[in-house]
Amino acid sequence: MRDIFNKMVGRNRYVGFRLFLHLGGSEVAPILGVLNSAAPREEDDINDLGERLVEICESLLEYDDSWLSATNEGEVYSDENEVAQYIDELFIDSSQRYGSGIELNSDSDFDRPLSIPVTRNVVVIITVVYTGEAPDLETDLSNISALQKGLKSLIQLHYQNRLLGFYLHFSPSRLGEELTNDQLLQYYPELIPL
């Protein structure tokens, strides 16, 4: 009802939203393939972005047995420029949270057999901008039931043509990188156990 009133008086409601989801266990590494193939591309239009968001959310829903912790945050704006600035801040913050990778420090590393570690931790960060209200996103998503509803609500944003933008970050970002428990605590201290 508020959306209808706001449209009548010429005001829009823009929401910037970010979700952190930590998946853990020996079976989570394959999600990296899904995330890499479904990650947004520069050339994507909003429909392509929405389809990619749907694919990612559906995959995450299939991995619900691996969910260990989560958190979410967001802000509501009536000005499109203000929400864009907020999303830029979230994007920069999310981008700075990577802390994993293979480091070859000396020539002696080349003498050892190559082994690729399999990560037991994956953190997915979904950042979106949408119009209107989404009660299942604008609540605490740090329990499994609320998180399931929240991911389904993200899917609906695309089908309801309310999605304005979408960014995806995840760590580790490549096969062979590992996100350790120490890095998890260092880079994602706001995660709340589910």
Image (cartoon, rainbow, N blue to C red):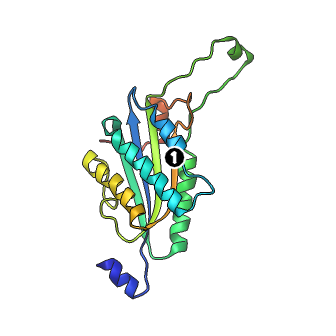
Tell me the quadrant of the picture where the N terminus can be found. Answer: bottom left
Q: Residue at x 35, y 52 (%)?
A: 151
Q: How many marks?
A: 1
Q: Residue at x 30, y 36 (%)?
A: 65
Within-10-Å neighbours for mark 1: few <14, some 14–19, many 20+? some
Residue 9 as seen in the image, left or right of residue 174? left
Q: Nearer the viewer, residue 189 or 107?
A: 107
Residue at the bottom extreme, as displayed: 9
Q: Which residue is mark 1?
A: 38
Q: Nearer the viewer, residue 150 or 83?
A: 150
Vertical relation: 186 (above or below) 119:
below
Q: Is residue 91 visible?
A: yes
Q: Position of residue 60 (x, y in %)?
A: 38, 43
Q: Residue at x 52, y 71 (%)?
A: 82
Q: Nearer the viewer, residue 13 or 41?
A: 41
Residue 84, image quadrant: bottom right
Q: Is residue 185 visible?
A: no
Q: Amino acid at mark 1?
A: Ala
Q: Position of residue 177 (x, y in %)?
A: 56, 30
Q: Position of residue 150 (x, y in %)?
A: 33, 54
Q: Position of residue 57 (x, y in %)?
A: 40, 49
Vertical relation: 160 (above or below) 153:
below
Residue 4, image quadrant: bottom left
Secondary structure beneath label 1: helix
Tell me the quadrant of the picture where the C terminus can be found. Answer: top left
Residue at the right extreme, as displayed: 107
Q: Nearer the viewer, residue 167 or 53?
A: 53
